[in-house]
Image: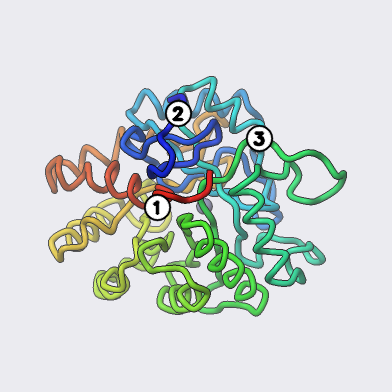
Amino acid sequence: MQPEPLAPGTPRVQTVLGPVDPSRLGVVDAHDHLFLDSPALKGQSFGDLEPMVAEVEEARASGIATIVEMTPIGLGRRPDRMRELSWATGVAIVAASGYHRDAHYPEGHWVHAAPVELLADRILTDLRAGMHPTDWLGADVPLDPARAGAIKGGTSYHRISPSEARRLDAIGGAAAATGAAVLVHAEIGTMAHEIVDRLEAAGTSADRIALAHMDRNPDAELHAEVCARGVILEYDTVGRTKYHPDSVVLDLIERMVSAGHGSRLMLGLDLGQRDYLRAYGGGPGLRYLMTAFAPRLRRRLGDAAVDAILIANPARFYALPAGSAG
Ligand SMILES: [Zn+2]
């Protein structure tokens, strides 16, 4: 999908190749990783272009048209390779700014001690001017032309550390200033209300906030409460059989849709380890969402509900509002 000129003031999704009309995104994998290197995931990094072209080509053949790449600042983000990958495969890629939870940054990394203003400023640069190719480590080099199109956050298990809280404040402020969507890694689905409270206090409106991994804690009553605040839930344990069978996620989605929250759900795979990728000899691979899971979901819910979750909801969520910069 190539970007095309959009009339000034119309809503847009910022892909690494430029702005795209939200109605053109097609099926969206709302949270995944294409290049990643984290000290918390030793031996599981992946940064090569060639295997990822093969992986994303399989995803495209399965029906995925857009991938939201949620690798934040400092975790091996590769804006240059994301552009090449999008050109090579025709799949639209939305890149992320923002910061992960503490565990993903080594001791002494600049994000731990940086003041809120600096943390926010680097997000705004990513969104408005282009991503820094080495995330402000090493040489002073020009920005990549690819801009980020969304913001990632992250918190710990049953805890928001002081450093994570500072990063959430920066994320919330940057989201309020730009209208960009925020997706927060809620470790094992914990701290949902506290994350939303913190971002709202920083000025972000609830409908610009999504929580990732809530299906690690598949508690439909809690999820309904969070959705009632206006927040989006992004489920991403599909194919993660070590946690639970897909039937748990199918049951959860069915319950959420019948409770009237079908417009507040999105799906991703969050394949953040080399072992999860078919191109590196692992699995389930990026195609799994469409080849294995979506057909089962369609049998349960019908096409309209599934198309909302895969197409309409992420298009609405990741769209920068009319009149936003860019
Ligand atoms: Zn992730």
The residue positioned 52% from the left and 33% from the top of the image is 18
| Of pointers 2 and 1, the one earlier in the residue sequence | 2
Eye-nearest disc, 2 or 1: 2
| Left or right of residue 96: residue 59 | left
The CB of the residue at mark 1 lies under 8 Å from ligand 1? yes
Q: Please name whichever residue, 100 or 98, is drawn nearer the observer in this view of the structure.
A: 98
Q: Place residue 33 in its image quadrant.
A: top right
Image position, residue 242 (x, y; %) = 43, 54
Quadrant where the N terminus is found in the figure: top left
Query: Quadrant location of residue 216?
Result: bottom left
The residue pinned by badge 1 equals: 236
Q: How is the structure coloured here?
A: rainbow
Looking at the rendered structure, the kind of residue marked 1 is Asp
Element under disc 3: loop
Asked whether mark 3 and ligand 1 are closer than 8 Å, the reply comes as no
C-alpha separation, residue under disc 2 versus residue under disc 3: 17 Å
Q: Is residue 22 above or below residue 244?
A: above
Give the residue drawn at x 66%, y 38%.
78
- x then y, percent, for residue 292: 29, 37
Q: Amino acid at mark 3?
A: Pro
Q: Which residue occupies the foreground of this view, 12 or 158?
A: 12
Residue at x 62% of width, y 60% of height = 99
Q: Identify residue for label 2.
A: 5
